[in-house]
Amino acid sequence: MSPSPESGLAEFDFSAFFRGLDRLNLRSRKRVTGREVGGRLSTRKGRGLEPVGYREYEAGDPLQMVDWVAYARTEKLFVREYEEERALKTHVLLDSSRSMGFEGKLGFAGKLAAGVSYLVEGENEAFGLYTFDGGLEPGDVGRGRLHLMDLVQRLEGLEAEGGTDLLSAAESCVSMLRNRSLVVVISDFMDDPKRVKDAVRLLGEHDLILLQVAGPGEVSPGFEGDALLRDSETGEELKMYMSDRAGRRYSRLVKRHAREVGRAARGVGGDHLAFATSRPPLAAMFDLMSRR
Amino acid sequence: MPLAQPLGLLGLLGAVPVVALYLLRRRPRAVEVPSLLLFRRMEDAPTYRSFLRRLMRERSLLLQLLAIGLASLALAGPYTVAEAPGGLAVVVDGSASMSGFTDEAAEVVNGHLDGEVTLIQAGPAPRELLVDGPPDRARDLIDGVQPLDGEADLSAAMTLAERRGAERVVVVSDFLGWKGRHPGDRASAMEATGVDVVFEPVGEPSSNVGFVDGRMSGTSRTFRLSVARFGGAPGDVTYGARVNGEVIQRGSVHVEPGGRSGIVLDGLPAGEVVVELDDAGPGFDDRAFGYVPEEGEEVLVVGEDGFEARALDAAGASVTVAGPSSPLEGFELVVLKEYAGVDYSGLEEYVRSGGLVVFVASGDISRVPGGILPIEPGTAESVDGVLEFRATGLTSDVSFEDVSVNRLLSAEAAEGAEVHVETADGTPVVASRQVGEGEAVYLGLPPSHDWNDFHFRREYPVFWTNVLEGGAIEHNLPTGERLDFGDEVSVETPYGSVSAERVYLDRAGLYRWEGGTVAANLFSGAESDTSSRLLEPGEFGQDGEGGGEAGGERRTDYTPLVLLLLAAVLLYEARLTGVGR
């Protein structure tokens, strides 16, 4: 395995990729909250068409929201609650740590990020790209084709560097999100499983999709015999002898790790999809949409 | 387990640099991985086991060490020695050149007889004189065995001895010459299967002068002989020629060592011819025998007088041209050109009783019964092509590929027929077939300008000479041939009178029976060359001093087995390291 910090996205034909995505439409399964009025269902109660229930009047509530018929019956002031239609904001968290520089993972993840953003842009909804390694690098949230082009330009200049700290990135992200949003995390999730679960729990307040990427050669160690292993992110070294048996055990651990990440996502009502970088990005997007 | 070459084990020292190289490059390979996360989770990840354990893990190193060990062992030549269970077979060379060494051969054989023995005489084909018989019986037999006038296939006799289950084979020969496979190669193959082979050379190389080639033309009454000298000094060789016991010619020829000179006796009267060299050498090849028929062959041509009759006349035959009703008795060759009115039952009886008949292609050849015709005839067809022919007695000295052919009878070879000449698409042009004691020949080239130009070619009489001399009426044959009579016939042979249905021409000389005489000759330059031994004792690892290296013991060499294991290890190692991928 030889790492490359370059994502290779500068040479990627995004136009052709987006044309292939035109047939797709991304829809959230959860209701969202937000201040802009959009085409999605929100859990925020307020002025809308669909009544969802009543609550007692509180000081400051508009008088026109008081249900006077109920007052006539009960002599108490009740305010009718409606479900508002609110716009969905999508936040894409893209792992740009050094481990993503192996086997084209960063490039593949960048294509998925662009694909998700393109589909959201097609719904005329807001989206933003956050990259993270040891910490979070927030990006602007906006709408429209120009914003998408800015996002693509940012992706093209992306390089794999730094360590992975998903929990720290999740904490930063959650503190910035005021409304319920769609959060898409694209990473190899090569982080401590406990910290990954904590991060997922934090992000689980939002509609969450975890997209795990792995190089086809990463399901096995890729070497035999004595080796001095060096962690690409931390520089730590580890001597070990890789026998056939140990190689098989490593492969089992890779699958187990992916299962743990998936289980954490499902635990908060989110989705988890794992992709090998050998899979065509469009096919991966089709898989994603068929799950949504 | 004893070793033939213990020094071969020094090859084990080759393991030292291999292990040293392994230790030198023991430094682990540096590998950068995305994360150590999962590697750390592996139970045995950071373990360093003992050096021995690490060695055990290095399959490639172990295989290399095993290969070095096996190669050293193969060099050392491991073997076991066990008591031989018996199974002695003695092969005695029966070739003509052994004629001067029979007593010495018998003495050598007697030295090996200490139990049951199989005795085989090597000749053109091996003969079992005794199978697992007592030594006394073998001694009696070996004293009476005489060499044959022919070449001996020693390897075939050795193979027969091996098939009879012999554990030890003693080959007694002068090793001056042989036919077939080299006996040294055969011995090596037998040794590999655990059979001990001991070569016992007898006699000594000596110079020789003898007849090495000869051809008797009965039709032209000429005997052409070739005399060769092997070793010795150049000089004249005197000879005398007798016909029916009377000296007709004496003379001398000068022969250089390694050279040949010819003797031509022409105008010979009918009868038995013996040509003898004076003081020539060992004696087995200093006489040549020939037979000239009483008169030219009596030939009947059925049909009009034509090219066939003239060609046969030129070949020395006494030709009678007659119609189809002519009796066949008394003729040694009948040529059929016309087929209407022929008594085919009489013709069949004539052939089956030993006659020779030639069927010349004709439009009505289909009248001939299928039982005697060498072909199954069809219709006459135009052809345009070159004839192909095999080198047989009938095609000798005739260039059939130069014959221009316009028409041919479409035909297929009859069952049992031999095709000598055919077209590219397989239409037989000259074919022959054995019918009873006689022979039938088909000639698809009738003397017609519309059909072909064969009759205008100078080889046309040569073909008819071949018919006369190569058919059932051959009187001069090489030794090793066989006379088949059908019924038991009393034959006077060079080795006495015998009564048999078939007689082998084992010895050079004259074979007489009622109604026929055949002269047999060994004309073999290889057998006559007694000036050098072709196989020296020890040349192929054999011990010629009698009894081999382990008299009464059987030695099993495990080197081939070790080499086989070595090859398997190397193949596995190549597969592990991905050689060829």
Image: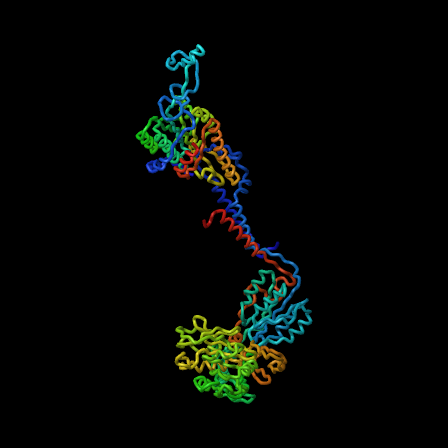
In which quadrant of the rendered view does residue B111 lie? bottom right
Residue A228 seen anywhere in this rendered image of the structure: yes
Front position in the image: A28 or B238: A28
Expressed as whole percent of the image width and height from the top left, the position of residue B571 reads 51, 51
The residue at the point 55 percent across, 66 percent down is B184
Residue B304: x and y, percent? 45, 86
Left or right for B116, reference B343: right
Pick the front one: A92 or B317:
A92
Compare residues B210 and A146 and report the one nearer the observer: A146
Front position in the image: B198 or B447: B447
A56 above or below B36?
Answer: above
* Quadrant of the rendering where the N terminus of chain B is positioned: bottom right
In this picture the colour scheme is: rainbow
Q: Residue furthest top?
A: A75
Q: Is residue B249 visible?
A: no
Residue B126: x %, y % from top left: 59, 71
Q: How many labels, in total?
A: 0
Residue at the spot 61% in from the left edge and 82% down from the top edge: B491
Q: Is residue A25 above or below residue B334?
A: above
Q: Position of residue B127 (x, y in %)?
A: 61, 72
